[in-house]
Image (cartoon, grey):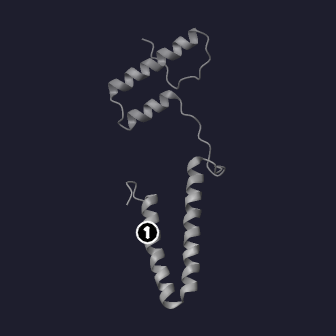
Amino acid sequence: MGSDGGYSLTEIFAIKFVLADIVIIAALLFAGPIYAVAITALLVVSVFLVWYLTERVGSGDATDADEPRREPVDPVTELQNRYAAGELSEAEFEAKLEHLLDSNERAERAGVETRELSLERERS
């Protein structure tokens, strides 16, 4: 099984071919060679169809109309999420946050329009 608990594409194709062999042998034994050839042709066409659809989805040609659009996350929220997930230590989080705030202040002084950060520097 794949690392995420599901089957990889290679495993799915291997299972499909094993099951296809069983079906073709059963068709040869019980229905005759013409039915076995017809079933084999259908299975070959289905393999190419699955391959085509996985390539199409993988290349991004398929429309994503059903998926909701995700709004971009501001840098401070992204930092908070990384810190909460344990990707950053407290010192790294503080340093990166300080850098973001300094960058925002420099941009404001230069007259560059930026999105407002969700946190402000504490005034002491």
Q: Residue shown at 49%/80% (left/top)? A: 24
Residue situated in front as seen by the camera: 53 or 24: 24
> Which residue shows up at 37% across the image and 54% down it?
3
Q: Amino acid at mark 1?
A: Ile
Can residue 7 be seen here? The reply is no
**Residue 105: x percent and y percent?**
52, 13
- Give x and y (percent) for residue 67: 61, 49
Which residue is found at the position 58% from the left and 85% from the top?
A: 34
Quadrant in the picture for residue 19: bottom left
**The furthest residue to the bottom:** 30
Quadrant position of the C terminus in the picture: top left
Front-most of 33 and 60? 33
Taking depth in this image into account, of 99 and 32 the one nearest to the observer is 32
Residue 83, compared with residue 39, is above or below; it is: above
Residue 85 visible in rendering: yes
Q: Quadrant of the N terminus?
A: bottom left
Residue designated by label 1: 15
Measuring from the top left, give residue 86's x and y in whole percent. Answer: 35, 36
Q: Is residue 34 left or right of residue 81?
A: right
**Count of all numbered marks drawn on residues in the image:** 1
**Residue extending furthest top?**
109
Residue pictured at 60% horizontal, 53% vertical? 56
Q: Count neighbours of disc 1 (C-alpha within 10 A) and say few if under 14, some if 14 to 19, many if 20 or more.
A: few
Looking at the image, is 63 positioned above or below residue 104?
Answer: below
* Residue 45 placement (x, y as % from top left): 59, 68
At mark 1, the secondary structure is helix
